[in-house]
Amino acid sequence: MNRERKLLQQAVAIVATIPVATGLYGVLFGQALTGDAVSISAESHFRFLSGLLLGIGLCFWSTLPRIEEHTNRFRLLTLLVVTGGLGRLIGLALTGLPSLFMVGGLIVELVVAPFLCLWQTRVANRYAEEFGVA
């Protein structure tokens, strides 16, 4: 149990680095991440969304110390990530294939995040069985 828990913690710590790093970069440098020139309003919106991305990554990191006890938080964060991924998928269908980095983001949002959520649930359930807690 403890080995699987530690592996999950390490995986979440590594994967959450993506939204933390890209969110922080987007907040500090705006649209420079994509190389596109946009209006000041679009730039402001991009920085706001980057702040949300940063916050999501930080919240995932906040589950690490007692990851087996944070199922509700983990599920909420995963729902936010998957919802964003579905928005990105709709955009792909409407406007075409984005850069490889954006496709990578889509894979993290619609495959990796749900996988980690299922894994967290497994660890939480095993913890509850072992220690008699719900």
Image: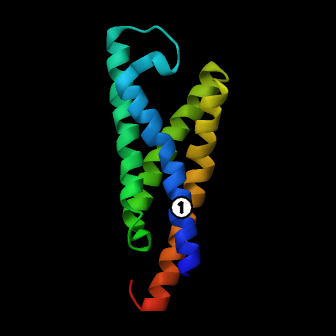
Crowding around mark 1 (Cα neighbors within 10 Å: few <14, some 14 to 19, many 20+) is few
Viewed as shown, does residue 104 lie left or right of 44?
right
Q: What residue is at 36 percent from the left and 52 percent from the top?
A: 59
Q: What residue is at 54 percent from the left and 40 percent from the top?
A: 85
Viewed as shown, does residue 10 lie left or right of 28?
right
Q: What residue is at 46 percent from the left and 8 percent from the top?
A: 37
Q: Nearer the viewer, residue 93 or 101?
A: 101
Q: What residue is at 51 percent from the left and 67 percent from the top?
A: 120
* Location of residue 115 with respect to 38 vertically, above or below: below
For the C terminus, which image quadrant? Answer: bottom left
Instruction: Please provide percent x and percent y for residue 23.
Output: 41, 34
Q: Name the residue carrying label 1.
A: 10
Viewed as shown, does residue 98 lie left or right of 133?
right
* Location of residue 24 with respect to 111 vertically, above or below: above
Q: Nearer the viewer, residue 45 or 22?
A: 22
For the N terminus, which image quadrant? Answer: bottom right
Instruction: Please provide percent x and percent y for residue 51.
Output: 34, 34
**Secondary structure at numbered mark 1:** helix
Q: Nearer the viewer, residue 94 or 105?
A: 105
Rendered image coloring scheme: rainbow
User: Total of numbered circles in the picture?
Assistant: 1
* Location of residue 27 with respect to 126 vertically, above or below: above
Instruction: Please provide percent x and percent y for residue 79.
Output: 45, 51
Q: Residue 27 appears in which quarter of the rendering?
A: top left
Instruction: Please provide percent x and percent y for residue 47.
Output: 35, 25
Q: Nearer the viewer, residue 91 or 26?
A: 26
Callout 1, which amino acid? Gln
